[in-house]
Amino acid sequence: MDADSLDALGREMHALAARLWPLPRSLTGDGVRRTHDLLRTWAPLVTHEVPSGTPAFDWVVPDEWNLRDAFIAAAGSSGSSGSSGAADRPRLVDLADSTLHVMGYSLPVDAVLTRAELEPHLYSLPEQPDAIPYVTSYYTPRWGFCLSQRQRDALGPGPFHVRIDSTLAPGSLTYSDLVLPGERPDEILFSTYTCHPAMANNELSGPVVTAALARALAARPRRRFTYRFVFVPETIGAIVYLSRHLEHLRARVRAGWVVTCVGDERAYGYLPSRRGHTLADRVSKHVLNHHAPGGFQTYGFLDRGSDERQYCSPGVDLPVAAVMRSKYGTYPEYHTSLDDLSFVTPAGLAGGFEALWRCVEVLEGNEVLRAVHPCEPQLGRRGLYPDLSRAGSAEHARTQVDLLAYADGGDDLLGIADTIGVPFRRARAIADVLVAHGLLTADTRPA
Amino acid sequence: MDADSLDALGREMHALAARLWPLPRSLTGDGVRRTHDLLRTWAPLVTHEVPSGTPAFDWVVPDEWNLRDAFIAAAGSSGSSGSSGAADRPRLVDLADSTLHVMGYSLPVDAVLTRAELEPHLYSLPEQPDAIPYVTSYYTPRWGFCLSQRQRDALGPGPFHVRIDSTLAPGSLTYSDLVLPGERPDEILFSTYTCHPAMANNELSGPVVTAALARALAARPRRRFTYRFVFVPETIGAIVYLSRHLEHLRARVRAGWVVTCVGDERAYGYLPSRRGHTLADRVSKHVLNHHAPGGFQTYGFLDRGSDERQYCSPGVDLPVAAVMRSKYGTYPEYHTSLDDLSFVTPAGLAGGFEALWRCVEVLEGNEVLRAVHPCEPQLGRRGLYPDLSRAGSAEHARTQVDLLAYADGGDDLLGIADTIGVPFRRARAIADVLVAHGLLTADTRPA
Amino acid sequence: MDADSLDALGREMHALAARLWPLPRSLTGDGVRRTHDLLRTWAPLVTHEVPSGTPAFDWVVPDEWNLRDAFIAAAGSSGSSGSSGAADRPRLVDLADSTLHVMGYSLPVDAVLTRAELEPHLYSLPEQPDAIPYVTSYYTPRWGFCLSQRQRDALGPGPFHVRIDSTLAPGSLTYSDLVLPGERPDEILFSTYTCHPAMANNELSGPVVTAALARALAARPRRRFTYRFVFVPETIGAIVYLSRHLEHLRARVRAGWVVTCVGDERAYGYLPSRRGHTLADRVSKHVLNHHAPGGFQTYGFLDRGSDERQYCSPGVDLPVAAVMRSKYGTYPEYHTSLDDLSFVTPAGLAGGFEALWRCVEVLEGNEVLRAVHPCEPQLGRRGLYPDLSRAGSAEHARTQVDLLAYADGGDDLLGIADTIGVPFRRARAIADVLVAHGLLTADTRPA
């Protein structure tokens, strides 16, 4: 993919994120459904509904939550209660301004409260006075408003009319997946999550980049691997998905990535699988070594926090890692309204996409190769070796020879690229020439 | 064991060491027997006698040495010889002052000697003028006196009446052992030595702490492992013991420690087994990592010097390591009269005991565990996960989740504790809760 | 070998190099044959001729090149052409001064040329104005003269009579080998190359030291291993040799060395085999650790450049490393006339020989040993342990004990020497004493 195409894709992805931004996402509900509707405009995802109450390993699918409206307004001096008189007072906190304003899975409420009564239901961040925090209470019944410290400080003494027009009732959990068949049944998994409301790096970047990967792979003329894309609510969604596909995934998945926090421009990061030396780990480290020339942060599995928790758990044990930009929990905007579409940029998304696309390129191009002849072949008579040195030519010739020297049918091309210190893409290009000249041959073993 | 009990135990151990102090110990003899008599007041040791001349691998049990009296006195000016006239002269060097004054296994002597004749039989340390050195000549017939450089300088010109009332004659070698049966026949070995005269860290601390371990384990209501305690003279005693129990020990011992130099307050040290990665090594390193927060000295097997030389020798190959305080050979008081009961303290002995007792706790609590459910379980509905964060609660919940994430039936709980960076005791407590909630189960494999 | 013998051998080797110096060596030709004739005066090498056109894996034996005369002379002002008149003009560049003056495998030429016509055929090094570079064009037809920059600057405007009296025609490639049978059919390989014209470290040192190794091993009363010595032109010669002996060498060779750059006094270097942990690697590193007390340079296999390229290639996979002095490509005199017999010295050659001879000593003395008795034996009664310490005696006794402690039939004596930190020679001497006392016994496994 050339630089111009990548720039254009970055802008497209950023525009998609902007359309997804206002939808009220949570574990379940219509905001999630509309999110999946938009994602399906990029790739032919298949959307599934799992009824509340469905068991999934140690868990049960929760009730569906829908949020229509919410506000805190000054109540009339007449002490009016209920919804009467609310319409004619200005809203001090309004869902229409940010879907973060309501604690996730808040119970409905409609009451006039004193400031003291309201206080236990308010969440703000004194040290980040302009940020609205992201708070949820999925499994303990509560209601609450999240607001900036400045808003909180300006609320006044009350009384307040507070209203959350939500429902929590049996319904279903929504997820989507897509399988793009390849020449081999072995699968590569990309999983992302669609439960976060208005936050951009964590987490609109994941769904948007994953949709772009799916679109690009669907358009790819040849796929050696089969690709599986999963869009679920975090934790419960991954658990539901695994409970329905565990044996298949254990048998088929050769490498996978949780796609999260891939939209800002600050950093790159790698989080290993639990076992730490899987194909996903090898590919991730190779790609970031060459793609992030300024270096990248390597985390430990103990730093995990997204659905690799499920994919790598005992009894699941999939080779799933993460290639990120600024990792969740490590940047100050994390889990607040400051994680917005200025922090996530077209270039940031393009960089996240490109890193993962290079992982795909490595997977598609990787194989075990074997030198055809004992000893070095005579490259010179094939025009592959300079008969007199010119700048750069000797180095290229040397790389050819080095690649041949390690092509003993043991390590795969990715491993050889690491050993001889060149990007996979260059190793693959050299190998293609050597194969065309009958000097290298593919081993029959799968990589 | 709480801090008060440990303090009391430290004082008890120090008092036992004080009673053992004046007994004239060596490889053999009545001083050793009386030492074992006192140790039997703490634990039901079984004492054995092995006749002189008994072969043990490449060795033979030596003659028994008994020492009743010894002194250097000024001889009368009348040139009296033999024992006559000695009683009425002051003793310049007297066994009653220190059992170190006589070279171990000294032949008997009773003679009047000039200073020049006496000189080759004197041992002192010019650089430590107040210290009496510890010298033995077990296998080459000699006699000698050990004294401080100050005593030596003050001896005067002589002549001297020197007398060592010792016997070296067929008898027997004394050792004790104790086996405390557990639920499993697999054994844990603690071995210490009882051949050193008046020195405290090296070596009254070993017998005293080992006796305390035996007493505490005898009182323990449940023992998963069988425990074996061995009190022998160093080298020849361990060789004799191994020659009698080799096949049994090779078949049964899962971990073992030579207990030596466990009584001062300066340092902690770890000396590995020859193979270096045995259960004893893993347990020792884990315990010292958490027990010695200021750090501890890690030695190599080439630094060995006690009975791990025998236990780890080719053909024996037991998984035996050492957890020490200041290691033999590394502190200035080593092998002199300065290694006394002010250098070894109640707190020092308590610390040595506690480190080894924590090794026992790890061994008793270690097992291979397996998560019951694929994916993370829902800890929240069991009250195991904070529904809102409080200080500390999130960290505890995280440790639970980390422990579950590695409980795949592969590594044991000790290994998981190391991986997730918590003391074994805490990992065990968390595992107990998770087992009680049906989320973890013991693998049937022995740890 | 004592220091005096080694000094004498150094002088002998240097004298042999001086006799080899003026012969016009290349891949093929009579200069090579005369080189092998001289080498056969040191050891009973068997010389072979392989006809031009013979295939060898991906290669074909090239035509034979012979060079009789070559010069650049000022041409007469009368514009004489051809060979007429040349004899009476002084030669500006003359083969008789240096065999480096003619590009290897130059086509014949005899012409009068202008300076401009001559220029593309001249090779010099502006940054090393006194050095004649070494240039070849084996597989692309060319002719050329190599000369110092000072010579080039002084050539004048021309015209020039240039003449290269060479022939390139079907003939044969010359190589020699020697097999010295040992008690075991397992082979140790030493390979060097005879294709470089007048350069001393790279490469007269290799043939000369290899001849000395062959002579010394032929004279050795007992050889545990069979030794194979190979003298070939670099690359094509090794490929030809491998094409004729591949299965035999793969089955028999236990360790091997490419002998190159072993004649100067500056440095020692080690270049690993491709697999990196073969017997040749272990021996090389051990020997250099103790032989080069100032340290030595460790290269990677990616730094290779001589016939280890062929010996370690996929499908050949021999355990071949290199022990060098200043490695090719790393010293300023490399591949120029400055790499001469003042840079290579008797002491430099002696040091190169000695390092490789110590490798032989390790190989001949290495075996797997096993302690006869469980536990430490009683060294004292055999006079092997000091009954009282003297300076040095305790350390020696300790080394004995350490060697016994690791003699468990697992690691070989070389590995034990590394573990306990002593030179192999000392470990072997101690082991001999312990074997003589019945305390150690050879394991039956081959090392």
Image (cartoon, coloured by chain):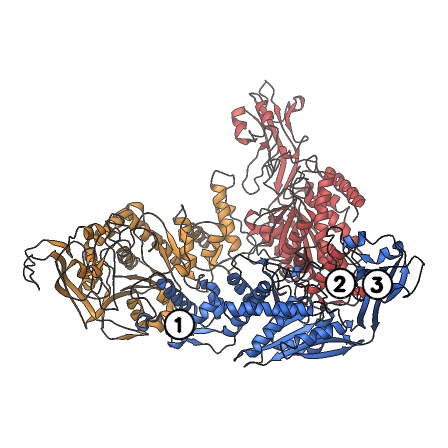
Chain colours: A red, B orange, C blue
Is disc 2 in contact with disc 1, using a CB cutoff of under 8 Å? no
Nearest the eye: B270 or B337: B337
Pointer 1 indicates a residue of which chain?
B
Cα–Cα gap, marks 3 and 2: 18 Å
Crowdedness of circle 1 by 10 Å Cα count: few (<14), some, many (20+)? many
The image quarter in which residue B259 lies: bottom left
The residue type indicated by label 1 comes to: Gly
Label for residue C97?
2
Give above or below for B247 relative to B207.
below
- The residue tagged 3 is C143
Element assignment for label 2? loop
Element assignment for label 1? loop
Toward the front, the furthest residue is C88
Q: Position of residue A421 (x, y in %)?
A: 67, 55
Cα–Cα gap, marks 1 and 3: 71 Å
Q: Residue at x 55, y 39 (%)?
A: A141
Crowdedness of circle 2 by 10 Å Cα count: few (<14), some, many (20+)? few
Nearest the eye: B349 or A378: A378
In this rendering, position of residue C300 left or right of residue A16: left
The residue type indicated by label 2 comes to: Asp
The residue type indicated by label 3 comes to: Trp
Q: Residue at x 61, y 77 (%)?
A: C252
- The residue tagged 1 is B315
Pointer 3 indicates a residue of which chain?
C
Q: Is residue B11 visible?
A: yes
Q: Earlier in the sequence, mark 3 or mark 2?
A: 2
Label for residue A240?
none
Nearest the eye: B168 or A410: B168
- Which of discs 2 and 1 lies nearer the camera? The answer is 2
